[in-house]
Image (cartoon, rainbow, N blue to C red):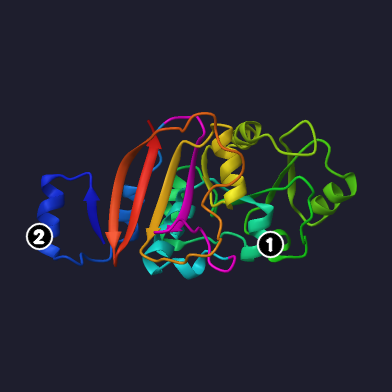
Amino acid sequence: MRRLFPVTDVTDETAAAEGAAGREWSLAELAAAYAYPEGPAPWLRGNMVSTLDGAAQHEGRSQPISCPADMRVFGVLRALADAVVVGAETVRQEGYRPARARAGFAAAREAAGQGPAPAIAVVSASLDLDFSLPLFSSPLVPTLVLTGAGAAPERVAAAEKAGARVVVAGEGAGVDPARAVYALAELGHTRLLTEGGPRLLGQLIAADVLDELCLTVSPMLTAGEAQRIAGGPSVTLPRRFTLSSMLEEDGFLFTRYRRG
């Protein structure tokens, strides 16, 4: 892996020493590159992958357009987070499992006051979820379910019976994205990561609560009618983000953008 941006004297010297292909970065180096900003306020970052022609998935899944380096970054971003926010449809399509504890991050998480693994926070208005899945039945830390005050009581009861913690983050049936972020912060989860899907990411963008986007640009073309990384209604005016860093490995670009 090579750092392409920001360019410094160290960047140039390292690139010259390692050659065009670079080398595999350690987990500690990746963690330093993707460290959350200091401060008590919640910080929500998104992590998505997109092909050159804008597809966020191939045949309904993101794995075919990913790569080993992307999965390393994926693991590091999870290891840095207090909670991972994910949409119900993504849970169903991607076969989500509980986040696991990683020995390489155990000391850092303990020093930061974090649990052994991030909590998974599932956003669902209907609570149409299979609560027998390991995500709910055997997580290392209890799975959170974010829903609205109008959720069906029997589905709330089913979630709680399975061991999930139900968090109300909306007045009606749906979830208010801003309220969800601050509800998680009130539980001590201020370092937040969302892995989508596109519909949820679009809702977070529309609500102006996304602080950072980590976007892997995959050197692939898929055509077809796959979703973009964010869906739903467009914002009134495009929101400007600033490039914070860019890494490269095997033709994949690992970009990091923050609010301008």
Percent x, y for residue 250? 29, 67
Percent x, y for residue 83? 57, 47
Per the image, label 1 sits on a secondary structure element best described as helix
Percent x, y for residue 236? 54, 29
Residue ID at (72%, 65%)? 133
Query: Quadrant location of the N terminus?
Result: bottom left
User: 101 and 66: which one is in front?
Assistant: 66
Q: Does the stretch in magenta take in 142?
A: no
Per the image, label 2 sits on a secondary structure element best described as helix
Percent x, y for residue 38? 39, 33
Residue stretch rendered in magenta on the structure: 39-60
Q: Does 75 sit left or right of 89 as displayed?
A: left
Q: Which residue is mark 2?
A: 16
User: 118 and 201: which one is in front?
Assistant: 201
User: Residues at badges 1 and 2 in contact (C-beta under 8 Å)?
Assistant: no
Q: Does 219 sit left or right of 130 as displayed?
A: left
Q: Amino acid at mark 1?
A: Arg
Check disc 2: other Cα within 10 Å, few if <14, some if 14-19, many if 20+.
few
Q: Residue furthest right?
A: 154
Mark 1 or mark 2: name the one nearer the start of the chain. Answer: 2
Residue ID at (43%, 30%)? 39
Q: Which residue is mark 1?
A: 92
Image quarter for residue 245? top left
Q: Amino acid at mark 2?
A: Ala
